[in-house]
Image (cartoon, rainbow, N blue to C red):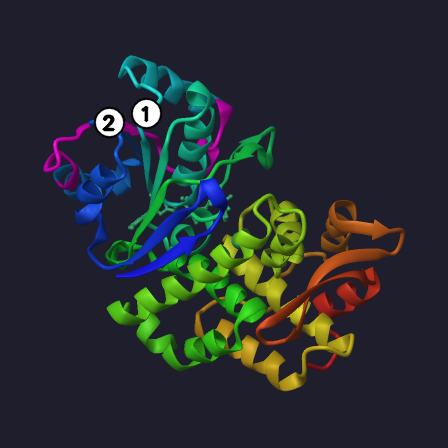
Amino acid sequence: MRIIKVALGTNSYEVRVGPGLLSQAGRWLSELGFGNKLVIITDPSVNRLYGEMLNRALTEFDFNVNTLLVAEGEDQKSLETAGRLYHQLTDCYTERSTPILTLGGGVIGDLGGFVAATYMRGVPLVQLPTTLLAQVDSSIGGKVAVDHERLKNKIGAFYQPKLVIADTDTLKTLPAKELANGMAEVIKSAAIRSKEFFAYLEGNLDRIKSLDENVLEEVVFQTASIKAEVVEKDETDLGLRNILNYGHTIGHAIESVTDFSMGHGSVVAIGMVAAATISNRMGMLDKNDLHRLKNVIVSTGLPTKLPNIKVEKIVQAMRHDKKVSQDRIRFILLKSLGSALVSDDVSPSLVEKVLIGDEKT
Ligand SMILES: NC(=O)c1ccc[n+]([C@@H]2O[C@H](COP(=O)([O-])OP(=O)(O)OC[C@H]3O[C@@H](n4cnc5c(N)ncnc54)[C@H](O)[C@@H]3O)[C@@H](O)[C@H]2O)c1
Ligand SMILES: [Zn+2]
């Protein structure tokens, strides 16, 4: 097992990463000194796969467990579902000391975390992420939210968990598409913060694909460490945390133009390649690094180019969202692999050219 300490003063907590960790949850939760009641929020698929094992681990330590099920899918991240959960929590006599455990991907973590942050002005939250994206990204950093009127994560809070348990064995049942979604965030983190980890990824892509236990542990540990370090320096997203949006400026614009019909990993991958190309055109990232980035993305099975979508629409969506002044867009660029910066000086016409791909790369 590897342990990351997220140092946030009184909001500090640990992220524990490794295979077989869900079976330790009972012991660790009893060490945290909560009462003997627990609530698990999960979805039916994850519950079918891991619910029984987690229940056994908890009841072994005399916890009285209530499981609340939420259907799968982003549309469950709503105030309506949160309202239903508040109702169910009241029914199972939850006290302020009763922790909520979120077992699942980012949807369950964000929704269950939002409910934990708001029910009775906050009950303890323990994140048990089971997707790669949730283990390396959404379970760490305390952003919890629901969507509102088609706007993602519009209603939310900063609410740090008491503990994160990332059992890398759960990744073995993850559909390939979900693994690829998580890999986009893994590649992003290496590209913005660690050239050593980027080189490790280049050398271990086959072992990631074959779900090698040691490599998965290392990949989750390294990526989660990067997220933790950035969050420690900027808990409430006022500065440095911006760099985690590398690849997401264009990614979010594609999502809005295509009405979320492409996977998040795919749009972030296209966004990363475009932002890297822009970096190169503006005299930063060198050609060799740009090719290395593209190669890793291609080997992961993620796209590097836009499908048949009108580029003007994407630039328009971005202008609306990330405009700094009349003719400049805010972007996260790469100086080199492992080093990012926020630029307020990217021209829409360069973005357009790069997205059309009419420039040599
Ligand atoms: N809070 C943050 O900082 C943050 C950061 C990034 C993303 N997010 C949010 O995360 C969400 C996306 O999360 P996601 O990518 O984990 O998707 P998800 O939560 O929708 O999970 C994807 C699917 O995988 C299934 N699943 C989960 N674990 C499994 C396992 N071990 N084996 C088999 N199937 C499994 C789920 O049932 C679900 O159908 C979005 O709502 C996004 O806004 C939040
Ligand atoms: Zn993302």
Task: Tell me where residue 332 sits by quadrant.
Answer: bottom right
Give the side of residue 119 with respect to residue 330, left or right. left
* Amino acid at the residue labelled 1: Ser
Q: Is residue 153 left or right of residue 71?
A: right
Tell me what residue is drawn at x 69 percent, y 73 percent.
277
- Answer with the quarter of the image where residue 152 lies: top right
Q: Position of residue 290 (x, y in %)?
A: 62, 79
Residue that extends furthest to the left in the rendered view of this protein = 60
The tag on residue 97 is 1
- Residue 289 falls left or right of residue 104: right
Q: Is residue 330 above or below residue 192?
A: above
Compared to residue 53, the image places residue 120 above or below, namely above
Q: Which residue is drawn at the image coordinates 72% and 82% (left, top)?
A: 360
Can residue 43 be found in the magenta stretch? no
- Report the residue that reaches farthest toward the front: 9
Highlighted magenta segment, given as a residue range = 57-79
Residue 6: x and y in percent read 44, 52
Outermost residue on the bottom side: it is 288
Do the residues under discs 1 and 2 have CB atoms within 8 angstroms? Answer: yes
User: Which of the two residues, 227 or 280, is positioned nearer the viewer here?
Assistant: 227
According to the picture, the residue beneath numbered tag 2 turns out to be 35
Residue visible at 46% across and 74% down in the picture: 197
Q: Position of residue 247 (x, y in %)?
A: 61, 61
Residue 162: percent from left, percent from top: 37, 40
Rendered image: mark on residue 245:
none
